[in-house]
Image: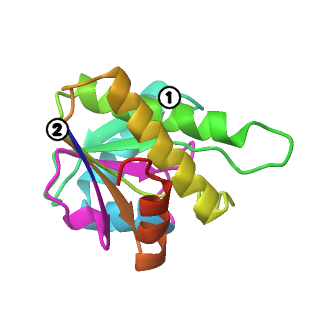
Amino acid sequence: MAIDVTSGDITQLQVDAVVNAANEHLQHGGGVAAAIARAGAPQVDNESTAWVREHGPVGPGEAAHTGAGAMPADWVIHVVGPRYRLGQDNAALLTQTVDTALDRAVDLDCRSVALPAISAGIFGYPRDEATGVIATAVEAWLQRHPDVLDRVVLVGFDDATADAFRRGLTTP
């Protein structure tokens, strides 16, 4: 199993599943979610709307999944990370979100997954802190589940975010 770090467009990666940093209603209005919706149009939006209609909003610790439309991936796994707030255990909530995303990837028989800096955009989680938590959570999940996934890619939309992911890994 490998953990790779890259910067760029998550929608262009050759992986089985792309993780979307979504909101509860799977309305893909900005950031990574908008990029995924554009790249996977119209399938991602249509299936997201159908998911919420059938299952209701995506809550903390839950994941939804849709097809990936025109993207190279097969699946989009939609998770809702924590909105960063003082006084709550932001790291535990973000770790739970990462675990949920990776668990859903396994449920979908994926062998490779790409994750963005969940919650580090409009949800206000400081980038360096969020990427460190995500990197640590991925490493811990892979240790608990050896030989389940072949590859996890941590994707920064820019070089600074990718570098922050690299700093968060304990095994570079």
Q: Which mark is residue 150?
A: 2
**Which residue is farthest front?**
171
Q: In the rendered image, which quarter is residue 2 located in?
A: top left
115 left or right of 41 in image: right
Residue at screen point 74% across, 36% down: 89
167 left or right of 144 in image: right
Q: Please state the total of marks drawn on the protein image.
A: 2
In the image, residue 122 sits, relative to residue 61, either above or below, namely below
Instruction: Report which residue position mark 1 lands on.
Output: 62
* C-alpha separation, residue under disc 2 versus residue under disc 1: 23 Å
Q: Nearer the viewer, residue 23 or 163?
A: 163
Under circle 2, the secondary element is loop
Task: Work out which quarter of the rendered image holds the N terminus and state it.
Answer: top left
The spot of residue 35 in percent (x, y) is 37, 68
Residue at screen point 16% across, 36% down: 111
Q: Which mark is residue 29?
A: none
Please check the rendered image and state whether residue 10 is part of the magenta-colored stretch, yes or no.
yes
Q: In the rendered image, which quarter is residue 105 located in?
A: top left
Residue at screen point 55% across, 36% down: 95
The stretch in magenta equals 4-29
Tell me the amino acid under the disc marked 1: Glu
Q: Nearer the viewer, residue 46 or 85?
A: 85
52 left or right of 18 in image: right
Task: Work out which quarter of the rendered image holds the C terminus and state it.
Answer: bottom left
Residue at screen point 45% across, 48% down: 135
Graded by Cα atoms within 10 Å as few (under 14), some (14 to 19) or many (20 or more), the crowding at tag 2 reads some
Tell me the amino acid under the disc marked 2: Asp
